[in-house]
Image (tube, rainbow, N blue to C red):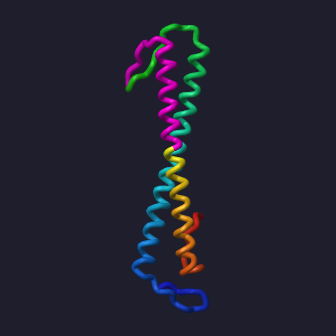
Amino acid sequence: MQQGPGGSETEVTWEDQQNINKFGRLNNRFHELEDEIKVAKEAIDNLEDASNELILTDEEVVRFQIGEVFAHVPKEEVETRIEEMKEVSSKNLEKLEEEKESLVAQMAELKKVLYGKFKDSINLEED
């Protein structure tokens, strides 16, 4: 039982506990997504920097990292690969952003339900 405002007690039902647990899982996933989005943005920035550096180079054959090895690859092929990698990274970033928006909406709905029942007895906000 939770102590409600004015000394009254609010009973925590099984459904309430499930909602609280679901909110906790969504919140954890939200933080994971924020980290993944940050990494994806950095990867896109790095690819953009590599693309810009490639434009500035005069060499026809450049070193391109494949896994843990650097290979000598024609400049045009590297440009194509970098563009493909940027497209894949951008699509991944969009997918992550959409999932984040969905989580935010679900968390807002759960906040309404839980704050509606527990008022000030529950804290779902970040500190």
Taking the spot 38% from the left edge, 25% from the top edge, the residue there is 68
Q: How many marks?
A: 0
* Magenta region includes residue 73: yes
On the image, which quarter does residue 118 sit in? bottom right
Front residue of 123/99: it is 99
Q: Is most of the magenta stretch helix, strand or loop?
A: helix
Front residue of 44/90: it is 90
Query: From what the image shows, is residue 112 above or below residue 102?
Result: below
Q: Is residue 20 left or right of residue 56?
A: left
Query: From what the image shows, is residue 97 above or below residue 29?
Result: above
Taking the spot 48% from the left edge, 40% from the top edge, the residue there is 92
* Magenta region includes residue 126: no
Quadrant of the drawing holding the C terminus = bottom right
Q: What segment carries the magenta color?
A: 68-94
Taking the spot 54% from the left edge, 28% from the top edge, the residue there is 47
Where is residue 31 shown, x and y percent of the image?
51, 54
Where is residue 91 shown, x and y percent of the image?
50, 38
Query: From what the image shows, is residue 125 above or below residue 15?
Result: above
Front residue of 17/109: it is 109
Where is residue 59 shown, x and y percent of the image?
54, 8
Where is residue 11 shown, x and y percent of the image?
46, 86
Taking the spot 51% from the left edge, 63% from the top edge, the residue there is 106
